[in-house]
Amino acid sequence: MPTFADLAGYPHKLPSNIDAGSLDSVFANGKTGKVVRPNPFLVFHQAVDRSAASAIRIGDFRLVKTWKSDKLELFDLSKDISEANDLSRRMSSKTQELHRKLTDYLAEVGAETRRTED
């Protein structure tokens, strides 16, 4: 959305809780610009037509949460791109750090995390 807003010349500031950054500088500088995001992480969240699931990525780490079972999985994508080795038990402090950032962000934007029929 920030890219479209920039390209369209939208004159107003976008909400700060939008989890995105504009690609306008990348387009304008021959693919060498930088995407500036309001948060140092990227959140993925799905709660429509199935049980809610979320993920957050910060640097090389990705935390995945399955809400129905309250399951947390942590992966180091620099060493495990296929997400085969769950590090959540071995790296419990990193797991809790990312979980807190994820749940704080989802609460801030009012994301649905539990379905009434689950």
Image (cartoon, rainbow, N blue to C red):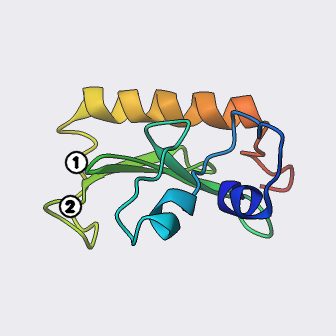
Q: Position of residue 96 (x, y in %)?
A: 38, 28
Q: Position of residue 71 (x, y in %)?
A: 47, 47
Is there any visible trace of residue 72 in the rendered image?
yes
In this view, 48 is above or below 105: below
Q: Which residue is mark 1?
A: 87
The residue closer to the viewer here, 74 or 22, is 22
- Binning the other alpha carbons within 10 Å of mark 2 as few (below 14), some (14 to 19) or many (20 upward) gives some
* Circle 2: residue type: Asn
| Disc sitting over residue 85 in the figure | 2
* Circle 1: residue type: Leu
Q: Position of residue 99 (x, y in %)?
A: 46, 34
- Mark 1 falls on what kind of element? loop
Quarter-wise, where is residue 118 in the image? bottom right
Report, in whole angstroms, how far the alpha carbon at label 1 lies from the one at label 2: 6 Å
Is there any visible trace of residue 51 in the rendered image?
no
In this view, 41 is above or below 107: below
Left or right of 94 on screen, residue 118: right
The residue closer to the viewer here, 51 or 11, is 11
Left or right of 39 on screen, residue 31: left
- Residue name at image x 60 percent, y 56 percent: 53
The residue closer to the viewer here, 88 or 33, is 33
Left or right of 3 on screen, residue 55: left
